Image (cartoon, rainbow, N blue to C red):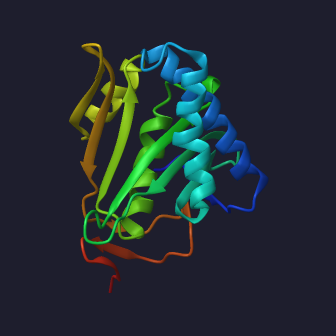
């Protein structure tokens, strides 16, 4: 039985802006902690390019979520971006950021939230999820591997691994989930997209 609910946040909502600024701060700090950048200004520029400019360039391709318990307590946030490029990459959804608040960590909520986000991806015609893990987040890397993500590439700076690129197919599935707050009935997902199951 599911304990969490994910709700997509409209781009016009103040919570959408809150997630954007939280991810900017996190991205700058992660760039420094991982060793990707040692200069604060370069780390800030990195976060600006990878977060703020992505949000501002195409807000409709950004999928931001509140993560709540079934009792409506907010426990976290997530940001995914639509990486589809027609003819090159037709169905990739990138998990850019997920945060479970500290008081709710170590309760398997991260795993459940990612599973719900995979359901959302499947429901919306995506067949691959990708992500990037900074080197100082070993616990996150272990979680993603346990959930079926595979290492696609390791990013190095001066022979030191600073981040790991990971990918996972989103397997076809039957979904009838009240935990994804979306206008969806009962979907069968495939590489061809969504079809209403009979």
- Give left or right: position of 11 versus 6: right
In the image, residue 117 lies at what x, y percent? 45, 53
Residue name at image x 50 percent, y 75 percent: 184
- The answer to whether residue 106 is above or below residue 108 is above
In the image, residue 109 lies at what x, y percent? 50, 36
Instruction: Judge whether residue 125 can be spotted in this image.
Output: yes
In the image, residue 7 lies at what x, y percent? 61, 57
- The answer to whether residue 50 is above or below residue 169 is above
Residue name at image x 46 percent, y 50 percent: 1
- The answer to whether residue 71 is above or below residue 191 is above
Using the rendered view, name the quadrant where residue 103 is placed. top right
Q: Residue furthest right?
A: 14
Q: Quadrant of the C terminus?
A: bottom left
Residue name at image x 33 percent, y 82 percent: 197
Instruction: Judge whether residue 179 can be spotted in this image.
Output: no
Picture mark count? 0
Residue name at image x 24 percent, y 59 percent: 171
């Amino acid at each position: 039985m599911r304990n969490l609910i994910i709700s997509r946040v409209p781009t016009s909502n103040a919570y959408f802006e809150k997630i954007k600024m939280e991810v900017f701060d996190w991205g700058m700090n992660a760039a420094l902690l991982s060793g990707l950048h040692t200069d604060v200004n370069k780390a800030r520029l990195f976060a600006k390019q990878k977060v703020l400019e992505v949000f501002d360039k195409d807000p409709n391709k950004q999928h931001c979520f509140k993560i709540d318990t079934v009792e409506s307590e907010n426990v976290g946030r997530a940001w995914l971006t639509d990486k589809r490029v027609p003819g090159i990459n037709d169905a990739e959804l990138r998990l850019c950021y997920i945060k479970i608040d500290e008081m709710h960590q170590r309760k398997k909520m991260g795993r459940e939230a990612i599973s719900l986000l995979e359901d959302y991806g499947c429901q919306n015609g995506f067949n691959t999820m990708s992500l990037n893990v900074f080197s100082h987040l070993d616990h996150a890397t272990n979680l993603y591997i346990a959930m079926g993500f595979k290492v696609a590439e390791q990013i190095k700076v001066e022979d030191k691994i600073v981040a790991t690129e990971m990918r996972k197919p989103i397997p076809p599935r039957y979904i009838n989930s009240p935990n994804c707050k979306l206008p969806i009935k009962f979907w069968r997902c495939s590489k061809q997209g969504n079809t209403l199951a009979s």
